Amino acid sequence: MKKLVINFKAYQESTGASAVELARKIAGVSSEVILCPQYFDIKEIAGLGNPVYAQHVDALSFGSRTGWIVPEAVKAAGAVGTLINHSEHTVGIGKAGEAVKRCREAKVQSLVCVPDVAAVVEAAKLEPDMIAIEPPELIGSGISVSQAQPKLIEEAVESAGGVTLLCGAGVSTAEDVKKAVGLGAEGVLVASAIVKSPEPEKLVGEMVKEL
């Protein structure tokens, strides 16, 4: 199956017990969907069987790092990977590169988020496990990048240098997913459409069918 990555962000609907219940519903549909909960929910959600990514790690190693997150810490909690440079937690390509390197050392997968094709080119040089292109203006808009900017996805796929390319921003329906895959994307990064859905398992099931 191509990749379906669900970012829980920090919504009330995806915090604590609600996050675990949401993850359990998704796990009941597919054990391959990647879940990105908040840090303190990683351990319990990882126990459900789906691969879990942290929402961010810092490009640091063990030491006096109060308030920072080292890759080894999220791995110890049960995460197998992490988002890096999401538009809501940007660090820039330079720091993203350092974080990818640290993740590689810790044997943690990396998914670098970028806003445009030029950034895809730079991110590909870092050799992360995946890249997600997300135009910031479409994030949370309900207007899918695959529908609004299809040429952007095609150009991003061509520019990814063989790195797995996902698309995000506004992806809300199975049709959005189908369109993204048809344009060459290897999957999608989704958030509010699923987290805030009254029937998240139904929507996940529809998206999984298109992957």
Image (cartoon, helix red, strand yellow):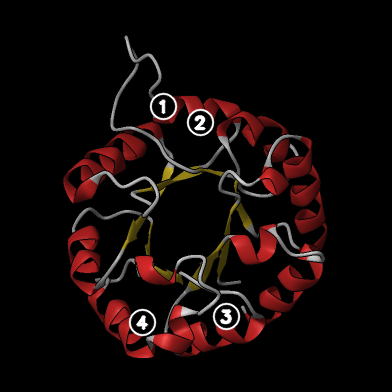
Question: Residue 169: horizontal and vertical position, in percent?
Answer: 46, 69
Taking the image as shown, residue 126 lies to the left or right of residue 173, namely: left
The answer to whether residue 149 is above or below residue 92 is below
- Report which quarter residue 198 is drawn in: bottom right
Of the residues tagged 2 and 1, which is closer to the observer?
Answer: 1
The answer to whether residue 153 is above or below residue 194 is below
| Amino acid on which disc 3 is placed | Val
Name the N-terminal-most of marks 2 and 3: 2
Taking the image as shown, residue 145 lies to the left or right of residue 102, namely: right
Question: Residue 102: horizontal and vertical position, in percent?
Answer: 30, 34
- The residue to which callout 1 is attached is 69
Name the N-terminal-most of marks 4 and 1: 1
| Amino acid on which disc 4 is placed | Ile
Quadrant of image for the C terminus: bottom right
Report the Cα–Cα distance between label 2 and label 3: 29 Å
Quadrant of image for the N terminus: bottom right
State the mark number for residue 153. 4
Identify the element where label 4 is drawn. Answer: helix
- The residue to which callout 3 is attached is 177
Taking the image as shown, residue 6 lies to the left or right of residue 169, namely: right
Q: Residue at x 56, y 48 (%)?
A: 9
Residues under numbered marks 2 and 1 in contact, where contact means CB atoms less than 8 Å apart: yes
Q: Please say whether residue 131 is visible from this viewpoint.
A: yes
Name the N-terminal-most of marks 3 and 1: 1
Residues under numbered marks 3 and 4 in contact, where contact means CB atoms less than 8 Å apart: no
Identify the element where label 2 is drawn. Answer: helix
- The residue to which callout 2 is attached is 74
Report the Cα–Cα distance between label 3 and label 4: 12 Å
- Report which quarter residue 96 is drawn in: top left
| Amino acid on which disc 2 is placed | Val
Q: Residue at x 39, y 35 (%)?
A: 57
